[in-house]
Image (tube, rainbow, N blue to C red):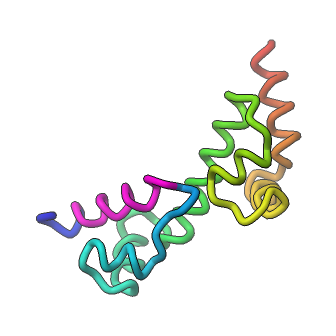
């Protein structure tokens, strides 16, 4: 990777490549040749959040998409996106979007039928 921006883009692509088993911050930093502190600092400058915050928000956005566009169970979605459990996923989703995954799915399905 030539520039720091390129290395950060590469770090982001590695981070989201396998949401069920993303690399640790230390492993990610090592792969792109930065300390974990520098990676977090530069990642936040470039993308507006730390690596862990970015991953959590990315997972939640992916969950939103899957809830609206598939009939995949909430448990399967939570597992595929790397949440510790369906209940942890549900609490994170509700905290962020102010709706449970079930309520969000129902609202989206109602909206798509109108």
87 lies above or below 111: below
* Quadrant of the frame with the C terminus: top right
* Residue situated furthest left in the rendering: 2
Q: Locate residue 3: give its quadrant.
A: bottom left
58 lies above or below 101: below
Q: Position of residue 31 (x, y in %)?
A: 29, 73
Q: Position of residue 109 (x, y in %)?
A: 80, 24
Camera-side residue: 69 or 113? 69
The residue stretch that appears in magenta = 6-18
Q: Residue 107 vs residue 14: left or right? A: right
Q: Does the magenta portion include 5?
A: no
* Quadrant of the frame with the N terminus: bottom left
Q: Residue at x 70, y 46 (%)?
A: 77
Q: Residue at x 11, y 65 (%)?
A: 2
51 lies above or below 66: below
59 lies above or below 43: above
Q: Residue 50 vs residue 95: left or right? A: left
């Amino acid at each position: 990777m030539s520039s720091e921006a390129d290395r950060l883009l590469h770090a982001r692509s590695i981070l989201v490549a396998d949401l069920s088993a993303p690399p640790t911050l230390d492993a990610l930093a090592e792969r792109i040749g930065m300390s974990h502190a520098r990676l977090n600092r530069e990642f936040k400058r470039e993308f507006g959040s730390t690596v862990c915050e970015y991953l959590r928000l990315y997972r939640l956005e992916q969950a939103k998409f899957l809830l609206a566009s598939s009939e995949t169970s909430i448990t399967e979605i939570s597992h595929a996106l790397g949440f510790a459990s369906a209940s942890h996923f549900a609490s994170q989703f509700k905290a962020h979007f102010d709706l449970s995954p079930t309520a969000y799915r129902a609202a989206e399905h109602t909206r798509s039928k109108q």
